[in-house]
Image (spheres, rainbow, N blue to C red):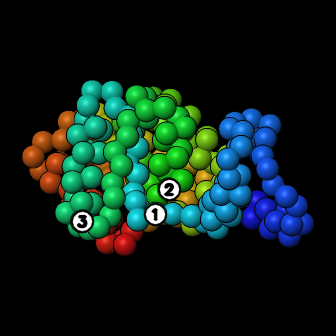
Amino acid sequence: MGKKIREFAALDLPLDMICTSHGVVWRRNPSQIVERYLEWSQDYKENQVTIAYDTMWNSTRVMAENIARGIREGDSELNVKLLNCAKTDKNDLLTEIFKSKALVLGSPTINRGILTSVAALLAEIKGLSFQDKKAAAFGSYGWSGESTKVLGEALTEAGLGVVDEGLRVPWSPDEGGKARCADYGKRLAKTFS
């Protein structure tokens, strides 16, 4: 994308308006969006981590909250966004992931896989081909616990740099499980910094 924008800018044409085939029509100061797209096309990222998850019985939510706590304790300068895939607009999720240097993705195990809201998000991430982003996975389980492996493989396939094999916690996290999640978050903060 950056190459085409630079080619257009080199034409030095007067720019009064940008009308996309979908989305916003830029009437005031349209060159500002050209500059922003140039910035965004260069593997843009802020000092932010997005934790996206879905949950069945709140176990994965509790994991996500404690991982977020650990990341914040591990690096207070790192902005942490905690988002539920089933309750957050897809575009808002993707915007926060785009802005982030890392994604931590969680799902409980269901039918030896992951929840459909998380699978849909992974399909979008793969299609967008994010570059130079780190990732990690986590999940709760009752019997078999495949979700973390499924997530790690899907994140790798989507082009994200998976940093470890992820965190699995059986059933609903007790105090020990919550502490494991917070410790995991602290380790991730060091990895992402």
Horizontally, residue 70 falls left or right of residue 94, namely left
Indicate the quadrant where residue 141 lies. top left
The residue type indicated by label 2 comes to Lys
Q: Secondary structure at mark 3?
A: loop
Precedes in sequence: disc 1 or disc 3: 1
Residue at the image position 67 percent from the left and 62 percent from the top: 35
Task: Please tell me which of labels 2 and 3 falls first in the chain.
Answer: 3
Cα separation, mark 2 vs mark 3, equals 18 Å
Residue 184: x %, y % from top left: 26, 60
Q: Amino acid at mark 3?
A: Ser
- Is any part of residue 135 visible from this angle? no
Q: CA distance from mark 1 to mark 3?
A: 14 Å
Query: Residue drawn 47% across and 49% down?
Result: 96
Mark 1 highlights which residue? Answer: 46
Which is more toward the observer, 94 or 13? 13
Q: Position of residue 193 (x, y in %)?
A: 37, 72
Tell me residue 108's x, y (percent). Answer: 36, 36
Residue hosting label 2 = 99
